Amino acid sequence: MSSSLLHWLRGDLHTHCEDPGLAAAYLEGVGGRLDFIALTNHAQKPALREQAQVVARMRDALPGLLLFSGLEWNTPAGGHACLIFPPSPHEHEHAQAFAQAFDRLAGSRPAVPEALGFLAALPLAERPLLFFNHPASGQWSTRDLDLYLAADQGGLVAGLEALHGHQTREPVLALDPLSYPGAAPGGLADHLYARGRPFALLANSDFHVHKQHLKPDYAPGVFNHIRAGVAPGQRDSGAVFAALRQGRTCAAQGHWLDLGDFRVDQARLGDTWKNAGQGLLRLTLAAGEELEALDLIGQFSRTQAPAILHSFGPQPAGALDLSLPVPAGARGFVRLRAVAARRERPWPSQRALRLFLSSAILLEGR
């Protein structure tokens, strides 16, 4: 990535449409809110078999939207995970074959190494990315994640959801996002970053258009969404997949904060900082409202547990330009967490914390 600022594309990689007749309702307003989206129907349901035709119609209806096809996998160990396939003539063929052979609710008896081996054997340009879904308590553990990482020989495992979808449900509103296992200090994301490889942090809607008459939810892009950092002028599938694979992402709840720059010297999100001396962390933001807290999370030494490294405290709305020295020889990672001061959500009757989280800059001081 060049020294110019990243350009942020907005997306959602965890959504469902199990009724082909609701394709238009699924797409309503999405083109004005998002740059990319993924349809990820459950692997064991008939909707996955119809997905090729649905995706084709959606792409014809909104040609300016990057629409990816994927599936939500009932994994053999852990909870759910999404597989997002790059667009290709074989994307649906690969998804169907995988679901039939490796989904535990589709009648198979899968094992993690064989499942990931199947995906790793696909041509590189057709190989999907894997993201761990809604890692609430009891869904995923560090032991589960390590099992998948050990079996990943094809660069498949790309990240996890930092926050929960189903944004309007009362049990989700009752969760404390500051201690949610996906992105709490020392949680699952930090376990991944401490291994010294980039991972994408995501915030998805888990929108089910066919359930809106039963359980209304915010539509894709209204609240939870991903920011994927690409080079200025890029807006194609390859650029989005590269950003996800490299861990150049932010997980955003709402549209109240824009990340301008976040770097240690010249290393940005997903990069590895290597320096024999002291480094300088630089952070620029455009805040549309006051911040209750602005924290840096990570570790400067592998002997210390990941934690809040520095708090910039409450911050006013407007342009922010902040910096922090990084110790010489720092080894670990650093990522950003911002908390909005107001509790308002898109539906005025619902109030809860709203977070903005970045993926990590890896630190390998020499």
Image (cartoon, helix red, strand yellow):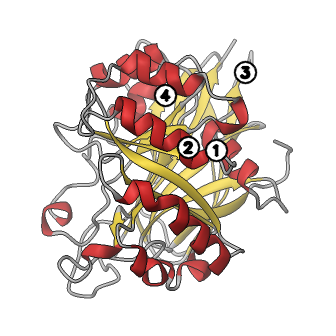
As helix, strand or loop, the secondary structure at mark 1 comes to loop
Name the residue carrying label 4.
193
> Is residue 342 placed above or below 261 in the rendered structure?
below
Q: Quadrant of residue 94?
A: top right
- Dot 2 amino acid type: Glu
Q: CA distance from mark 1 to mark 3?
A: 40 Å
For label 2, the SS is helix
Q: Nearer the viewer, residue 147 or 97?
A: 97
Asked whether disc 2 touches disc 3, contact meaning CB atoms under 8 Å apart, the reply is: no
Q: Is residue 62 visible?
A: no
Question: In this rendering, is residue 194 above or below 343?
Answer: above
The first of marks 4 and 3 along the sequence is 4
Residue receiving disc 1? 90
Q: Quick one: 115 or 134, which is closer to the camera? A: 115
* Image coordinates for residue 157, horizontal then vertical, percent: 50, 30
Question: Residue drawn 63% across and 80% down?
Answer: 61
For marks 1 and 3 on the same chain, the one whose residue lies earlier in the sequence: 1
Residue to which mark 2 is pinned: 93
Would you call the spot at circle 1 few (<14 residues within 10 Å), some (14-19), or many (20 or more)? few
Q: Residue beneath label 3, please?
A: 274
Mark 4 vs mark 3: in front: 4
Q: Are marks 2 and 4 in contact (CB under 8 Å)?
A: no
